[in-house]
Image (cartoon, helix red, strand yellow):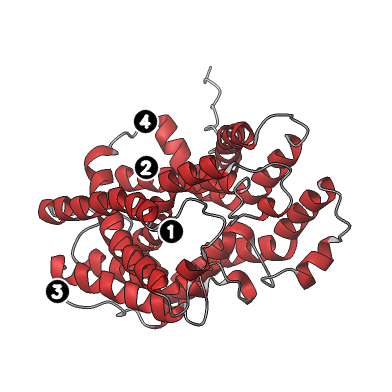
Amino acid sequence: MAGPRLSQVDNLRTLMVAWVIGAHALMGYLAVGGWAYDEVNEVSFTPGAELVVTALIGPSGLFVIGAFFFVSGLFTPSSAARKGRRGFAVDRLLRLGVPWAVSALLVWPLSVWLAYLAAGRDVTPWGLVASRSPFLDSGALWFALVLLIYSLGYALWPRLAVGGVLNGYHLALAAGGIAAGSFLTRLVFPARSGQPGDLHLWQWPQCLGMFVLGLAAARSGWARALPDRLFRMSGMIAGATVVLVPVVALALGVTDVASGADAYLGGWHWQALLTAVVEGVLVVSGSVWLLGFAQRRFTWDGVFAATCARGAFPAFVVQGPVLILLAIAQRPLGVPAEAKALLLVVVSLATSFWVGHLVTARPAPAVRPAES
């Protein structure tokens, strides 16, 4: 039987989904790229503005995706226990596999095709499916495919994470393991490289490490209460790292994010090792702190919060076509990229969560006629 929902965690999911949508809206106008619209954008941020945006969202970008996998792992054991292995696997296939397949085979190719047409490119939707790199690109839904793989792995091996109560030593081991795994993986698959199915293999040490950490945290009771000592420690480490990252970047002479970044993305470079270490420290400390902060501060539970929480996953699913279509609609606007990006953030968030609300809206109860 399912226990009561934890509104704090629901609110955390809502805000993380909003962060992803907003970040993708900005990335479409960045020269460094990372979102499909940057391939055809009509304007882009100035180098100075791009540096500011990267400094503001870059550090959080190193751990927000990991935080999604951490929270998913945190609630996987209870979900599997309620539904059983078979029911859990079927539920994951329907909730994660179907949206990914529809996005990869239909919705995302059509969305990118429309963007290419708006930019005057001569392509066909199915030509994009066959020739696009990575093959079977699904936009933001790569997350669903990777989480599906991990979830099915848990269904086959439910004792994936065992052991006693987690402490700071375990978190340090997790950070070190993610850092080492990321550096070694990126010797073969550099960051931002594409693989069939858009599997993001270069990010797997982070994603899998945080999913397994979430499984272990579930057994330590962190879903309801993160210990105060670990909350404070994680917050201090994450805060110091976030402050130091832009300072170190400037000290190393990184003033143009769009150029000279290859050494940080992978290969046998000290810059790639530094990136992996920062990522490992930040994804563990940042995710753990974010969970504890949500439990202590994200306590609102009114109708609006509940509506947003219910619509968060559908909003995540539809964000791709919403962002592309809205970016196309504002192409004729003769304003700088910075203004277009901010407008897109606001409108895409409202539209995506509105669609999420329509999908999850509960019908009003039938009113029985008064008896005479």
In space, the residues marked 1 and 4 are separated at their CA atoms by 27 Å
Residue sitting nearer the eye, 287 or 32: 32
The residue that label 3 is drawn on is 164
> Horizontal placement of 119 versus 74: left or right?
right
Badge 4: residue crowd in 10 Å (few <14, some 14–19, many ≥20): few
Q: What secondary structure is found at the residue carrying circle 1?
A: helix
Residue 302 image label: 4
Residue sitting nearer the eye, 71 or 188: 188
Residue at 50 percent across and 67 percent down: it is: 92
- Sequence order check, earlier mark of 3 and 4: 3
Q: Is residue 3 visible?
A: no
Q: Are marks 2 and 1 in contact (CB under 8 Å)?
A: no
The residue that label 1 is drawn on is 65
Q: What secondary structure is found at the residue carrying circle 3?
A: loop
> Horizontal placement of 144 versus 328: left or right?
left
Kind of residue at disc 1: Ile
Residue at 68 percent across and 65 percent down: it is: 104
In which image quadrant can residue 278 be found? Answer: bottom left
Q: Nearer the viewer, mark 3 or mark 4?
A: 3
